Image (spheres, grey):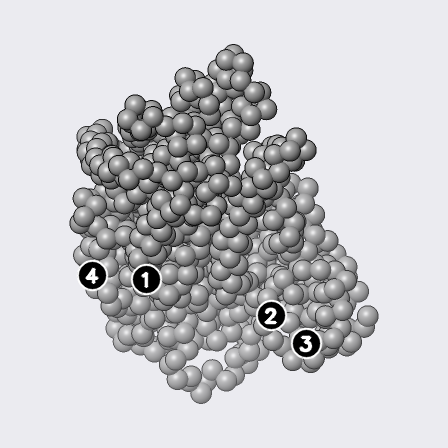
Amino acid sequence: MSTESAQAGLSSQEALERFRQYGPNDPAPKKQRSQWVELLVQFANPLVAILLFASVVSAFVGEVVNASIIVVIVSLSVGLNFFQTFRSQQAAERLRKAVAPLATVRRDGVFMEIHRAEVVPGDVIRLSAGDLVPADARLLEAKDLHVQESALTGESMPVEKEFKAGDATDATKVSLGTSVVSGTATALVIATGTNTTFGDIATRLRTRAPDTEFDRGIKQFGSLIMKAVFGLVMFILVVRIAMHRSAFESLLFAVALAVGLTPEFLPMITSATLARGAVAMAKHKVIVKHLSAIQNLGSIDVLCSDKTGTLTRGVMSFESSLDAFGAPSDTALFFARLNSKFETGIRSPLDTAILERPEAPAAAGYTKVDEIPFDFERRRLSIVVEQAGERWLIAKGAPEGLLECVTAHQASSGEEQPLTPELRARCRETYEALSARGFRVLAVAKRKVDAEASYSRSDERELVLLGFLSFADPALPGAKEALPSLQRDGVRVLVLTGDNELVTRHVCTEVGLDADTMVLGSALESMNDWALSQVAERTTVFARLSPAQKNRVILALKHRSHVVGYLGDGINDAPSLHAADVGISVASAVDVARDAADIILLEESLSALHRGILEGRRAFGNVTKYLLMGTSSNFGNMFSMAGASAFLPFLPMLPTQVLLNNLLYDMAQITIPSDNVEAEVTQRPQRWDIRTIRNFMLIIGPLSSIYDFLTFYVLLRFFHAGEVLFHTGWFVESLATQTLVLFVIRTPRNPFASRPSLPLAITTLAVVLVGIVLPYSPLAGVLGFAPLPAGYFLFLGTATLTYLAVVELAKRFLLRASRRSGARVPIGARIEAP
């Protein structure tokens, strides 16, 4: 394909055909299964499969009705689980698409933005500073293009790329997984998805992402439940076979019991709760890219952030142009504007403020020759320009670093004079005085250079200092109010900034942060990781940090078992966004930062993030309710079945009744995601605490069993119940107690002082009513139920009310014990000595 035809790009029809041929531009695609396959997978659950197999066997031996009931109940349970999970996943996917990475491509002769996944071979893409390269491509045009390739090569410094006709080396190609540091380019896409260099690496090295704290908590909870299930099932089988009971009937009952104890709705409840939280957060202008990030957001107890854009507006206003010693002079502004005008890297707010100043007529005579891009080691950017046959290198950057490259200064007369130690000290006093007043300061310097093919950082020497520019970056409205609110709700805010300590102290004082104890990047260089972890515990403000040093602070905090969030929006923030437990960026951030983040803020404010954190805690609180229910009353009822099967001459409940009981119980809880959450839950970071869950199981579970055994006694002693009446009486009692106890367990408060959501109240009461009505319905005979005597309901009401009161007392005891034990030990905590 010729360069001319390649430049034209593709038509929409050609792009569609190639998309069908090559598929989505995803370097590590997940295997997508149709919703029908997903539904069938639900039936592949071992316990469900055993039940369905047993129902087939039952049908063959003549138990057609019982077999049909098992199939219907299992199908309803699986179908409900699938429907709710699928709907939650769809809601999450819609939110992810709202912040999906974009690419600029030429289609039908016009450049437009499309989702990166839609890029196909043959597309012409346009690249500029801050962009993620969307696919492997060959350059068609390039201007001062520098690309960060560390994801592929491990090389930390940007690599220069240029177009050379007929050259097929790597110097003329850009790759998926890299990012543009400076410059602009157009390129022809030659490979997408798994056919790219990055895709090949991702395919060969594909591993499961490290478990989050949320994942670890779910796994440990599952392990706890499965141990209990295995123990009870084996106990029932051994005891009943030893008593010479029907092996097939015992197996069916044991498996039904296992289904009843296994929290098979946990994935659905979790997905629905988190999806609901994600939708609620979107209304607060917080977009979640990964559902599990919601719980992690609610667990944050340390939030690290640069001050720009979070404590301050991030919109600079130009204040003054001064000479080297603080006298007003437009010389620094003139040359700084040339530098900002010709640079092709990401325009900072400082550049924007400079370019808003009117251009001097003399600037028209300057043309650009070359560019030495900005990096965070030098903290400056240089442009080489030519005017009237002479070349000048103009450098603009942080005063601390640029002053080291200066050997002279330009006097007000225009004459260059040597910079003696005394004059150098005066220059330093000039910019430090500006910084102490809260101004952002840039130094500007130049030197005459010889004509060369290209220029490098080594040419930034023997510069002549022209002066300083100052900029105001006022505090963000609401920041001073948001910081105490975050602190009150258990989130400690740390400032990690590259700015000097004088500006940082002024801004932090303005918004009410303690900046008396400040640690500089130079101090971090002499600290080992353990020492840094101690310092990070008692320090609020870190200044003059490089991106690598920000990363070290985050890892030190994580090492001490903090859940760390990091808020950033620049190229240099990508490593820290990856390192943090929760990476947070803003909609206006560069592609690299948005791609690395888990959470995207549509509104640049700490208040929006605070609202998102509280929403994450609400979601976690509702998931916890289901866990506590599954390990307390539900476990107690299943334990009762295991115990009763050891001494009763018949099964305490038929397998179909066990399954129906479990289905109704689960249906009562499908509205848990809609429930209200108390302030006690949202006012502190939420961490997985398997000890509290285990204690609920070991204390409230046996309490439930005590009431079950009391029910057995009353049914046999006072009502002289036979098998059918026994099954009916216990079915109604177990369903009522284990369902209504949700009103007690759902809140740390007195249940009468905490109102459940209307959907939860309706489903819970409706399920209890269904359980009471079933023995009197036409289905009673089919399900093995019989009408209960009127006197039984007097016992049922008394037993249920006293059971709820006893559980309330036990709950208060457990919560007090948890508080007395001090800080909870979260799953996956790391506690290490020096």
Q: Which residue is mark 1?
A: 608
Q: Residue at x 68, y 67 (%)?
A: 187
Disc 2 residue type (three-letter): Ile
For marks 3 and 2 on the same chain, the one whose residue lies earlier in the sequence: 3
Q: Secondary structure at mark 3?
A: strand
**In the depicted view, which residue is nearer to us: 40 or 345?**
40
Locate residue 481, reporting x and y percent. Answer: 20, 61
Cα distance between the residues tagged 1 and 3:
37 Å
Question: In the rendering, which numbered label is found on residue 107?
Answer: 3
Mark 1 burial class by Cα count in 10 Å: few <14, some 14-19, many 20+: some
Disc 3 residue type (three-letter): Arg
Q: Which residue is mark 4?
A: 481
Q: Secondary structure at mark 2?
A: strand
Locate residue 215, reporting x and y percent. Answer: 46, 40
Cα distance between the residues tagged 4 and 2:
39 Å
Question: In the rendering, which numbered label is found on residue 114?
Answer: 2
Q: CB under 8 Å between callouts 4 and 2? A: no
